Image (spheres, coloured by chain):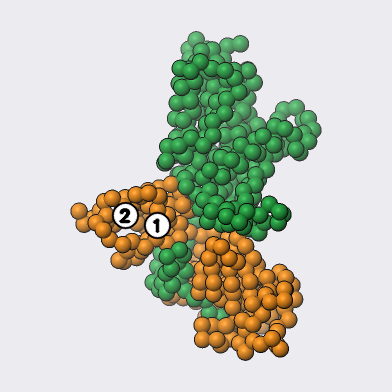
Chain colours: A green, B orange
Amino acid sequence: MEFVSPEGLRLDGRRPMEMRQIRAEIGAVSSADGSAVFEMGNTKVIAAVYGPREVQNRGQQLNDQALVRCEYSMANFSVGDRARRPKGDRRSIEISLVIRQTMEACILTHLMPRSQIDIFVQVLQADGGTRSACINAATLALADAGIPMRDLVTSCSAGYLNSTPLLDLNYVEDSAGGPDVTVGILPKLDKVTLLQMDAKLPKETFEDVMELAIQGCKAVAQYIREVSTQNFIFLASVSQLSVIRNLSMLHISYLLAQTNEWSI
Amino acid sequence: MSSTSKSTFIDELVVPGDVILDLEKLESETIKLGDGLRQDCDVITVTKAGRLRFLKPNKYWVESSHKRYVPCVGDTVLGIVVDSKADNFLVNIKAPVLALLPVLAFEGGTRRNIPKYEMGTLLYLRVVKANNNMNPELSCMDASGKAAEFGPLKDGCMFETSTGLARMLLSSPTCPVLEALGKKLSFEIAIGLNGRVWVNAPSPAAVILVSNAIVSSETLTGVQQKIMVDKLMQRLQ
């Protein structure tokens, strides 16, 4: 099958090095401590973060760092064929693990020992690249929850079809059976936290494909940065604060609360 | 080179990973880091999204608003009793771990008169110990051992907001929403820095009005807050 036309256009009209349109929104789940929706083209993912809170299962408690848990699931309506997916199938367990490890690499877990952070990601619409979209959504949700992190992890995938490296594969390209390289990076620190590939690739080609994926990650990083600063609801009057009574090395609190009474 | 000692990010929005200061460029001076910043080798990086603040001469921190609370000594908080043990009450203050309230941490507290708090009791408390390796410790006394205003909050209504809103409500000068409400209504309010707010007033309608006004004031400016309160008051009459 022809995935790149002679004019150099892909099936959905993109150029090989073009990403799908991305859109993100912070604060989609009001009951969660942090949440976000992330879209890459037709792929749409929602993430909710709870915590740091008490460890639910005492046996899992870690005394030197926070316990990070992640649950990935796909909504039944997210794919074309409405097949029943058991909750704990191998694929979702594997992706849960991948997301957990990627997020754990950037969360400063040692700052919150004996607590637990839950990350729930659900795919609302699947069109390839759900893994990357989930990681990007989880990053935004963690930033919204105010969990201390080294950097904002971002992820993007790239593939190699018709002897052309392609950025951000969609479902049709993904299921073509070619190699699919998913990369997760810490953009500011320039470190790779996730690298997955499903097929074989010659070394030189792999480097090109990975470089393309990293470029994609950086583009996502720029967007995520914009979103998390834009959506940062800020209190107008806090900037006018004049009294700061308590300033410790670790935390700063503004004013000692008093039970005040206002009357006419 | 005097300008290098100050970060160029001050009062800007920052996100995790941003490098705000390079220690190598500093001329052997001390800086103090607050919430949301950490030292990574020779640079100071951000760990939380928010606005970078600077206080002369050398204090930096990231100001942000969240739904969770990080305990800090001296903060006053609203806690909910979760469990009672022989020596401590376990209290939920929205922190990463449950906080301990020693049964003797009350004015004139002795073994003989231990207060009886049932699960779910709302308390106005002060944080006396907070560090990473222990559960935070609370007290129902002020620093001089007086009960002050601390203790159980009866009646009224409690709702949860963000830590940023709680700080705004406690700011000085009094924040516009409370000032506007206070001119027209009489009510009691207790604000915890952990983002819990308790309101009590003679009539339920007033409690609801005050709660709604506070919740919706989070994203409004001072003038907008006053207009919003005026509109709500019209509805009450």
Mark 1 nearby-residue class (10 Å; few <14, some 14–19, many ≥20): many
Say which label, 2 or 1, has the lower sequence index. Answer: 2
Of all chains, the one bearing label 2 is B
Q: Are marks 2 and 1 in contact (CB under 8 Å)?
A: yes
Residue shown at 39%/72% (left/top)? A242
Q: Using the rendered view, name the quadrant where residue A42 is placed.
A: top right
Residue shown at 72%/70% (left/top)? B83
Amino acid tagged 1: Leu
Residue B80 percent across, percent down from the top left: 67, 71
Mark 2 nearby-residue class (10 Å; few <14, some 14–19, many ≥20): some
Residue shown at 48%/12% (left/top)? A7
Amino acid tagged 2: Ser
| Looking at the image, residue A174 lies above or below residue A76 | above
Q: Which residue is tagged 1? A: B52
Q: Which residue is tagged 2? A: B7
- Same subunit, labels 2 and 1: the answer reads yes
